[in-house]
Amino acid sequence: MSSQHIYKKLEIVGSSKTSIEDAVQNALTECSKSVRNINWFEVVETRGHVRDGQIEHFQVTLKVGFRIQGS
């Protein structure tokens, strides 16, 4: 095993009808089903969908950092 850690970042989008925080959690929950060693996330964009003057859902774009296995 290496004494150095190597990381990779990927970009994902999550959504929720409830809140921005739920959109972030939904994205991370789904991402963690197929990506191991997630160490951090960064919200890079926040937006939402409006219908009839009301928020329909929230959407967030995240950059997710994870450690390459074996590093």
Image (tube, helix red, strand yellow):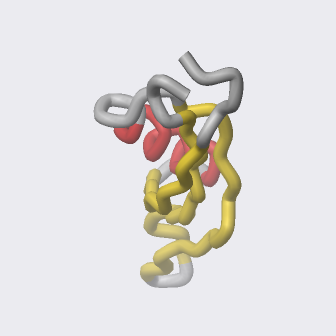
Q: Nearer the viewer, residue 29 or 69?
A: 69
Percent across and percent down for residue 56 are 45, 67
Identify the residue at horizontal 38%, vertical 35% (top origin).
35
Q: Position of residue 45 (x, y in %)?
A: 64, 72
Apparent side of residue 43 relative to residue 68 in the rendered image (left or right): right
Residue at far front of view: 2
Question: Quadrant of the image for the C terminus?
Answer: top right
Whether 49 is drawn above or below 13: the answer is below
- As drawn, the residue found furthest toward the bottom would be 52
The tally of labels here is 0
Identify the residue at horizontal 32%, vertical 29% (top origin). Answer: 33
Q: Quadrant of residue 42?
A: bottom right
**In this rendering, position of residue 47 left or right of residue 51:** right
Q: Which quadrant holds the N terminus?
A: top right
Q: Residue 34: image x %, image y %?
A: 30, 34
Q: Is residue 32 above or below residue 52?
A: above
Q: What percent of the width, then of the height, locates residue 9?
A: 55, 54
Where is 15 relative to 32, above or below?
below
Q: Residue at x 55, y 39 (%)?
A: 66
Q: Residue at x 49, y 79 (%)?
A: 50
In the rendered view, tell whether residue 51 sits above or below residue 31: below
In front of the other: 18 or 22:
22
The residue most toward the top is 1
